[in-house]
Amino acid sequence: MGLIRQTLIVANWKMHKTIDEAVQFCQDFLPLVADVSKVDMAICPPFISLDRVSQLLVGEKVSLGAQNVFYEENGAYTGEISPLMLKDVNCNYALVGHSERRHIIGERDEAINKKVKAVLAHD
């Protein structure tokens, strides 16, 4: 018997919303989806908003996701964010292999594979 997965809806905010705008959005949005069932929901704000949004999602039906992740736990990787850092702000999801990362940043399958393995290794 195969695993039956619940539908997952993810909102990737890309490079939109300041921290204050993210907070206001959550305050407006969360009551609107409080009664939604039979679907998992996640939002992926910019990194600068992860901590504040995480605090707003405590006890809510919406999970937190990151727009990217690096495959190392720590080190001299300026501008990157590790799976451990994401777990620290209660991220349950991470976008990996996004088309913009591939086409604009030039990420290749090898790096994406490392990211997938790192995310899975950190639940």
Image (cartoon, rainbow, N blue to C red):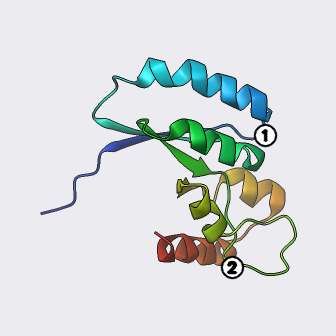
Q: Residue 77 falls in which quadrant of the image?
A: bottom right
Nearer mark to the viewer, of 1 and 2: 2
User: Which residue is at a point 73% across and 44% down the rendered structure image?
Assistant: 46
- Residue 33 picture location, percent across and down: 43, 23
> Depth check: 84 or 94 in front?
84
User: Which residue is at a point 70% across and 31% down the rendered structure image?
Assistant: 22
Q: Is residue 119 above or below residue 66?
A: below
Q: Residue 103 falls in which quadrant of the image?
A: bottom right
Q: Please indicate, yes or no, whether residue 98 appears anywhere in the rendered image.
A: yes
Q: Is residue 79 above or below residue 99?
A: below
Residue at the spot of label 2: 72
- Residue 21 picture location, percent across and down: 75, 26
> Depth check: 76 or 16 in front?
76
In the picture as drawn, the residue positioned furthest to the left comes out as: 1
Looking at the rendered structure, the kind of residue marked 1 is Met
State the SS at label 1: loop
Residue at the spot of label 1: 15
Q: Is residue 94 left or right of residue 74?
A: left
